[in-house]
Image (tube, rainbow, N blue to C red):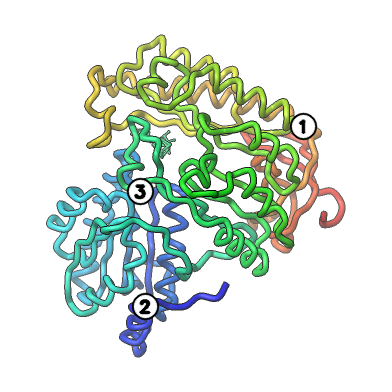
Amino acid sequence: MKRFLSEPLQRLQYELADRDLGYFVETFGCQMNVRDSEIIAGMLESAGMHAVSMKEDADLILFNTCCVRDHAEKRLLGNIGALRQLKERKPGLVLAVCGCMMQQQAVAERLFKRFPFVNLVFGTHMLDRLPELLLAAYAGERVCAVSAEEIHVTEGLPSHRPGGASAFVNIMYGCNNFCTYCIVPFVRGPERSRMPEAVEAEVASLAGEGYTEITLLGQNVNSYGQDMEAGIGFPALLARLSRIDGLRRIRFMTSHPKDLSDELIQAIATLPKVCHHVHLPVQSGSNRILKRMNRGYTREKYLEIVRKLHEAVPDIELTTDIIVGFPGETEEDFLDTMALVEEAGYAAAYTFKYSPRQGTAAAKMAQQVSEADKRDRLKRLNDLQAKKTRENNEKYIGFNGRVLIEGCDDKEQPVAFGKFSNFKMVYFPGNRDLVGSYRTVTVTEIRKNSLFGRLEGAETE
Ligand code: 5AD
Ligand code: SF4
């Protein structure tokens, strides 16, 4: 895609023309942040900088932060503290902290005060202002920039992806759902969908560069287009992207159960490029807790969607997110979650202890659950899911399907690995030359918790 550098980016390029600066970006949190970091890297590359693989070699270190749960924050503070000495040895080093955690005004200001050696602090809405902020930093200023007056979708920013066959593509930003435990709507702002033409152009350009698999990103892709007048919905977007030559697989995440429509189920079942995997966070199996979480569905409605998905797409796999120890969660509520996990049959579950986030409704709720109960429930839930994963794996013996080969461990007997359409990973004897190709693999055995198999025949169309 043709990109035009913004005026501040051109100025930065000009200012840095005689310098050979290395940058290091460390990303915390979800795929949204990974994608933002690719855009940050794109801007830095356009300014003439190059990536380095060690912080010690960098002239600019940037932390892209997350604030969804507490421990991400703790890790970040430790990471920044550890750079104090490096900065003393290398005074020209520019340190920047951005992302979701910095979109919280009070947190950003506290960090800016606490670490005087940090040059730049800026929130998610300031991403496209990075060139201006860097110009200020190189002019010797310290800047803490959190809120933007208007939140908009900026198209055409440079981007630097790591290469390979897969790429992330944002289709929307922000979230309107206000689940009571979640900080995301506060730091990422309201839902904003990208124009279908812009998404289509980006995907077509990626396909032209040789990417064959894309993952469409949004906090709730199922409500894509609802914020646009005469916009198209998510199933229609999938149909449109399916027509792009060279593209072979379309993945997407995350799906909110309350907005998962029959049309989407049909799109997954009938559009050959759309992968047979849905990440469908349930969060809890108790109706009482789902209500307190403001999730907008019941366990019955959720299980109904699960049933419909399996019926329409027999080889589909589902993954989920679950929170244990939400305020007011009793042993009985937790057992409802366990029963739901037993019934839904997830390929994998990402499980979390509830972590109060300042400013959210749940943080103010009575009946916070003790740390000991949270720990105990998390362990029981993880044990159950491990058992379910093992059981689920059994059915794969003899299964064969097309795999996109993602990598290869260079051992004495090299093992290649890749995923089926439904996101299940499989390992098999193979070499590095296979990486990026699509092959048919038959599963022959289960080792530990992984599928092992063998390659069949030649590259598949
Ligand atoms: N505490 C624990 N887990 C959380 N998540 C979001 N907010 C919190 C919180 N305050 C989890 C949810 C979400 C995933 C991305 O993170 O399960 O789906
Ligand atoms: Fe957070 Fe809920 Fe929005 Fe997901 S849907 S980002 S959990 S508020």
Q: Is mark 3 within 8 Å of ligand 2?
A: yes
**Identity, as a three-letter code, of the amino acid under mark 2:** Leu
Q: What element carries label 2?
A: helix
Q: Position of residue 206 (x, y in %)?
A: 62, 65
Q: Earlier in the sequence, mark 1 or mark 2?
A: 2
**Identity, as a three-letter code, of the amino acid under mark 1:** Ile
The residue under the point 23% across, 65% down is: 120
Q: Where is residue 212 in the image (x, y as percent from the top left)?
A: 68, 59
Quarter holding residue 13: bottom left
Give the labeled residue for mark 1. Answer: 397
The C terminus lies in quadrant: bottom right
Which label belongs to residue 9? 2
**Identity, as a three-letter code, of the amino acid under mark 3:** Arg
The residue under the point 24% across, 67% down is: 86
The N terminus lies in quadrant: bottom right
452 left or right of 58 in image: right
The residue under the point 69% across, 39% down is: 268
Give the labeled residue for mark 3. Answer: 188
Q: Nearest the camera: 187 or 231?
A: 231
Quarter holding residue 274: top right
